[in-house]
């Protein structure tokens, strides 16, 4: 019997055991190549002979470079294109694009404006499809964040994460992960930029321990990790209104003092110092933002290995 194609679209769709296997593989794989040149392939070359296509409808630095480096370290290769250079940019159906690329590559990573487009792509794809960020979620980022937390502080299970600011796509993937991996999540956002209610309802069904509030101090109190993100995501048009409304949600040293004394600070980057986070916090001793950025590479190698059926 043929196995179903392993798409990596959203964390709420995945089994807890698969998420655990990805995080554990990432940690082991990173340790096994400590000090090696970055272009050298891992000893087991789990993507040997495989090609990943990457399609970008939005800007990217970390996702673009980390997936490319990831495939090289796994022994595979990549083909990268901006969507605007492809025929989908001129209206070719996304389903036809998926069927064509399925004949040419072994997996596809897409960064898309509209989440449903990634889901439609996956429905027509014969090879694994990975969500590299949409308007609704950013699962690869949260896998890197969880890997980073566990490197510094041990298992996320039973720990408390606080999200402060816009209840956006990155926040959504954190909500998706919380019930799967057993951490508590406190979210502080103004009502107008509240996290998605469907995400919260689904997490509640999965026994997620998630608290929402408009008060950042309440969310951060006693947290083991404080996370924020830009107040204006790619595609947002209400720039000035967002900056005004979200101003009380800046993560600064006073707010960090409410968290656990050894709390970590995370941000997926790119950051806007002086807006969602103060310079003192993002460049201070609790910040692990560059470990987080590096761990995009390590987490995604294991996401790819999972998609190729090598783990989990
Ligand atoms: N964090 C993140 O996804 O960064 P890029 O937009 O640079 O890919
Ligand atoms: N929320 C941000 C994340 C960027 C990595 C955005 O969607 O633009």
Image (cartoon, rainbow, N blue to C red):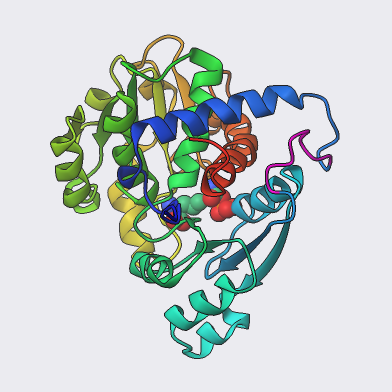
Above or below, 153 against 109 in this view is above
Instruction: Examine the structure image and report whether residue 118 is included in the region drawn in magenta.
Output: no
Res. 266 in view: no
Front in this rendered view, residue 85 or 267? 85
Which stretch is magenta?
40-47
Q: Quarter-wise, where is residue 252 in the image?
A: top left
Res. 231 in view: yes
Q: Quarter-wise, where is residue 102 in the image?
A: bottom right
Q: Residue at x 75, y 43 (%)?
A: 73
- Tell me if 97 is positioned left or right of 258 in this view: right
Q: Residue furthest top?
A: 261
Q: Residue furthest front?
A: 1
Q: Find residue 120 and report its horizontal and vertical position in percent.
A: 37, 71
Front in this rendered view, residue 309 or 203? 309
Front in this rendered view, residue 129 or 254? 129
Above or below, 165 against 154 in this view is below
Q: Say which quadrant the N terminus sits in.
A: bottom left
Q: Find residue 202 and report its horizontal and vertical position in percent.
A: 18, 44
Above or below, 61 against 210 in this view is below
Front in this rendered view, residue 183 or 190? 183
Q: Residue at x 33, y 50 (%)?
A: 168
- Tell me if 288 is positioned left or right of 222 in this view: right
Above or below, 74 against 113 in this view is above
Name the dominant secondary structure of the magenta segment: loop
- Tell me if 262 is positioned left or right of 67 in this view: left
Q: Quarter-wise, where is residue 134 in the image?
A: bottom left
Q: Find residue 42 and report its horizontal and vertical position in percent.
A: 76, 35
């Amino acid at each position: 019997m043929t196995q179903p194609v392993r798409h990596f679209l959203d964390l709420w769709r995945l089994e807890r055991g698969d998420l655990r296997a990805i995080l554990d593989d990432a940690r082991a794989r990173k340790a096994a190549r400590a000090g090696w040149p970055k272009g050298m392939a891992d000893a087991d070359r789990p993507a040997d002979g495989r090609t990943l296509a990457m399609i970008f409808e939005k800007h990217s630095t970390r996702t673009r470079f980390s997936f490319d480096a990831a495939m090289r370290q796994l022994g595979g290769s990549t083909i990268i294109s901006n969507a605007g250079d492809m025929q989908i940019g001129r209206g070719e159906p996304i389903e036809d694009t998926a069927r064509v690329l399925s004949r040419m590559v072994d997996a596809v990573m897409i960064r898309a404006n509209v989440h449903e487009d990634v889901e439609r792509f996956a429905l027509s794809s014969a090879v694994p499809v990975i969500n590299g960020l949409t308007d609704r979620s950013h699962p690869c980022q949260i896998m890197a964040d969880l890997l980073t937390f566990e490197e510094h502080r041990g298992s996320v299970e039973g720990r408390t994460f606080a999200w402060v600011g816009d209840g956006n796509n990155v926040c959504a993937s954190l909500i998706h992960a919380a019930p799967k991996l057993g951490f508590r999540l406190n979210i502080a956002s103004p009502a107008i930029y509240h996290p998605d209610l469907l995400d919260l309802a689904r997490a509640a069904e999965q026994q997620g321990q998630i608290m929402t509030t408009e008060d950042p101090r309440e969310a951060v109190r006693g947290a083991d990790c404080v996370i924020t993100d830009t107040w204006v995501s790619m595609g947002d048009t209400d720039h000035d209104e967002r900056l005004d409304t979200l101003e009380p949600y800046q993560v600064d040293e006073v707010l960090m003092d409410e968290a656990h004394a050894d709390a970590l600070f995370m941000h997926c980057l790119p950051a806007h110092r002086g807006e969602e986070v103060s310079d003192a916090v993002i460049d201070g001793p609790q910040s692990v933002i560059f470990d987080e950025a590096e761990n995009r590479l390590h987490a995604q190698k294991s996401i790819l290995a999972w998609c190729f059926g090598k783990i989990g």
